Image: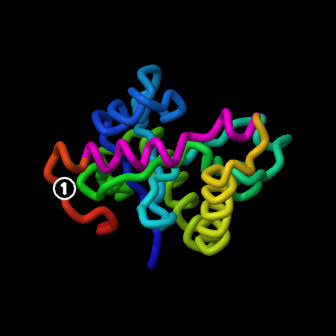
Amino acid sequence: MRLKFYTANINYCDFLRLSDPCVPHVHDTKNTRPFVGIILSVGEFNYFAPLSSPKPKFAKMKNQIDFLKINEGIWGAINLNNMIPIHPNCLTEVNMEIFTTDSKSDVDYKNLLSNQLSWCNSNRIDIQTRAMKLYKTIIEGLGWESLTNRCCDFLKDEVQYKEFCKQNGYTSIKECK
């Protein structure tokens, strides 16, 4: 199955953050760009794994169990440490279509997204494998302290996910768009 880009529902992420402060904010108030991610099947859940836009520091960083550079970091990175379980009702697919009315910065951003998505689809098996390895490492308590501290609490988030679904009448936990 080909990967797509999504944004996560702000209210859902805020709900998870009540019990897990590592859950990222999905909309940066300094920036108008949404927090974009991919959906991975991890355990019995679908997980939203957020991307990071390119940063100069990525050139010096190495891929790690929880961090994967996209095209050597030129196009950003995938922050597996910040992945969260998510229901499809809490996702919005990102439209990367370029319109004649788009500003140059919007066109550049959509081109970046297109490059990122192409790379992610070419590397989806590796991404999925890394996500599962990280998940297993964290839930089995095998992560070193700094790794555990920078990762979301996957098990706690899964409990909260189920509560959120119950409160909002969502039934199937693994259906995804």
Look at the image and say whether residue 155 sits in the magenta stretch: yes
> What secondary structure do most residues of the magenta stretch adopt?
helix
Quarter of the image with the N terminus in it:
bottom left
**Residue carrying label 1:** 170
Residue 105 at x, y percent in the picture: 47, 38
* Residue most extreme to the front: 140
Question: Height in image: 75 above or below 21?
Answer: below
Where is residue 75 drawn, in percent x and y?
65, 51
Q: Tell me the magenta residue range.
A: 146-164
Please give the name of the residue rendered at 31% of the width and 50% of the height, measured from the top-left corner. Answer: 162
Query: Where is residue 24 shown, x and y percent of the image?
Result: 49, 34
Which color scheme does this rendered protein use? Answer: rainbow
Give the number of marks.
Answer: 1
Kind of residue sitting beneath label 1? Tyr
Q: Left of 85 or right of it: where is 51?
A: right
Furthest residue toward left:
169
